[in-house]
Image (cartoon, rainbow, N blue to C red):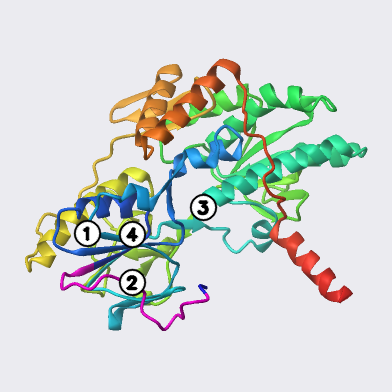
């Protein structure tokens, strides 16, 4: 917490008589809403615990050394420099006090007339404490850097050790979850094994590195078509990834992964992409929650039980006939909801009801499996291969914030495409798992 500001103090904001819209979270949904409110006579306050927007679809490329983190993050203040009615505050929301129309942050209190919750999701380890302690999720740029540091540290240690079993354990990777993040991560690691490991680590044979992709269901990319699922499986197996279906992870002690099917795998690197849950501050009534720690919203994205509180993006769950458990937690839903809520807010603030309900327009799904391979579901069209990869690359490149970031990513991709090199294999800071840190702290306390 800031030493100069207590939680019970007001966060300093410009005085005016305009309605104040507080937006918690600057992800795809939050930024889309802020942009749609640009010309409205309101004071918009954007709160985020980071001072930057992160392009989450490319987190796996930071994790596998293809991109530097500053290629896929963009400072909020730079992004919102022309938005005269928008104020950014770097703070973490601790609690929502809806009865007082205020949010409590680690930097102080912010009052609101209208509140929009766009806090997204966090990794859901489903109560598996061992996996949370020894594994890593992939939901933030910090997670990606931790994965990169863990990976390179373990590969370096494998070059030092004389124990063959320990070397095998250090160089093996287990990815849990066969959705887009897991599939893309597995493909990137397979290319790292093929093109980077033999050059960087001549101390051992690259074949020692095993990559396992574990999926609790019986197919990959469960939300996509059967063609996308089968093609992604074919691509990954050809790249040397060992895909195991109907395998739910039950235990992990930092070295051995045990599954529900009785399989045991030795690996010091476990990456968890198997689930998420809503990242929601305290204070919302329990009857406003639905499965996955999401907020129940109506057709205009108003949170159940609150007149002036809305939710958009991954945190919001709007049940429809086509999606009884809410819309998929993907960027397109977040972007569309952010733009839509801007229209709703214009009516609500002027004292009118907005009659047109939110309708999600599915523009299709894409997933890449290394270079030159991807799968695409676009309406009735299902295709895979090089064309799908070109489409994936164009869509993602143009979706990144900022010209500089687009240029950096484009140049990196071009260089990697021509050389199959990954130039960011740096250990910037030493990484330790939560369980290891806890043991170190205990030892220090015992010595003292």
Residues in magenta, as a range: 3-20
Q: Nearer the viewer, residue 87 or 65?
A: 87
Front: mark 4 or 1: 1
* Pair 3/1: label in front: 1
Q: CA distance from mark 3 to mark 2?
A: 21 Å
Mark 3 / mark 1, whichever is N-terminal: 1
Mark 4 and mark 1: Cα distance apart in space: 25 Å
Q: In this rendered view, identify the residue nearer to me: 129 or 193.
A: 193
Q: Which secondary structure, mark 2?
A: helix
Q: In the figure, residue 379 lies in which quadrant?
A: top left
Whether residue 15 is in magenta: the answer is yes
Compared to 97, does 327 lie above or below? above
**Mark toward the start of the polypeptide (4 vs 3):** 3
Q: CA distance from mark 2 to mark 1?
A: 30 Å
Vertical order, 371 against 33 (above or below): above
Q: Which mark is residue 85?
A: 1
Does residue 363 appear anywhere in the picture? yes
What residue is pinned by disc 3? 275
Labelled pair 4, 1 in contact (Cβ < 8 Å): no
- Judge whether residue 143 is colored magenta: no
Residue designated by label 4:
316
Q: Earlier in the sequence, mark 2 or mark 1?
A: 1
Label 1 environment density (alpha carbons within 10 Å; few <14, some 14–19, many ≥20): some
Q: Does residue 171 appear left or right of residue 195 in this picture?
A: right
Residue linked to disc 2: 288
Question: If you read the primary sequence from the N terminus, does the residue marked by circle 4 or circle 2 appear first?
Answer: 2
| Position of residue 127 measured from the top left corner of the image (x, y, whole percent) | 60, 64
Residue at 73% x, 33% y: name it: 210
Circle 3 Cα neighbour tier, 10 Å, few/some/many (<14 / 14–19 / ≥20): some
């Amino acid at each position: 917490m800031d030493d100069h500001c207590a939680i019970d103090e007001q966060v300093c904001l410009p005085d005016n008589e305009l309605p104040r819209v507080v937006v918690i979270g600057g992800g795809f949904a939050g930024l889309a809403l802020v942009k749609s409110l640009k010309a409205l006579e309101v004071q918009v306050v954007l709160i985020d615990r980071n001072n930057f927007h992160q392009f989450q679809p490319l987190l796996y490329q930071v994790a596998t050394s293809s991109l530097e983190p500053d290629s896929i993050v963009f400072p909020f203040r730079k992004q919102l420099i022309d938005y005269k009615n928008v104020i950014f505050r770097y703070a973490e929301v601790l609690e929502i006090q809806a009865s007082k129309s205020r949010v409590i942050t680690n930097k102080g209190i912010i009052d609101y007339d209208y509140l929009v919750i766009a806090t997204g999701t966090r990794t859901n380890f489903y109560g598996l404490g061992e996996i949370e302690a020894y594994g890593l999720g992939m939901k933030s740029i910090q997670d990606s850097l931790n994965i990169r540091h863990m990976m390179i540290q373990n590969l370096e240690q494998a070059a030092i050790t004389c124990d063959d079993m320990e070397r095998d354990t250090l160089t093996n990777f287990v990815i849990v979850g066969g959705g887009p993040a897991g599939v893309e991560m597995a493909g990137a690691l397979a290319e790292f094994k093929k093109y980077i490991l033999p050059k960087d680590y001549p101390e051992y044979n690259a074949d020692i590195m095993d990559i396992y992709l574990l999926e609790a269901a019986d197919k990959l990319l469960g939300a996509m078509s059967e063609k996308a699922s089968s093609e992604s499986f074919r691509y990954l197996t050809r790249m040397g990834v060992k895909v195991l279906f109907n395998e739910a992870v039950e235990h992990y002690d930092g070295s051995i992964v045990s599954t529900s099917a009785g399989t045991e795998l030795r690996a010091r690197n476990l990456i968890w992409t198997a689930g998420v849950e809503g990242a929601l501050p305290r204070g919302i009534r329990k009857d406003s929650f639905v499965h996955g720690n999401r907020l129940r919203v109506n057709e205009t994205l108003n949170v159940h039980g609150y007149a002036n509180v809305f939710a958009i993006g991954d945190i919001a769950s709007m049940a429809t006939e086509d999606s009884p458990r809410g819309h998929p937690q993907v960027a397109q839903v977040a972007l569309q909801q952010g733009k839509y809520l801007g229209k709703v807010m214009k009516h609500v603030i002027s004292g009118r009801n907005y009659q047109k309900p939110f309708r999600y327009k599915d523009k299709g799904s894409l997933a890449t499996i290394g270079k030159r391979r991807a799968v695409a579901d676009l309406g009735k069209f299902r295709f895979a291969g090089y064309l799908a990869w070109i489409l994936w690359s164009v869509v993602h490149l143009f979706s990144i914030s900022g010209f500089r970031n687009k240029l950096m990513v484009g140049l990196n991709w071009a260089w990697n495409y021509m050389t199959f090199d990954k130039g960011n294999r740096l250990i910037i800071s030493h990484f330790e798992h939560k369980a290891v840190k806890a043991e170190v702290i205990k030892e220090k306390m015992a010595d003292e």
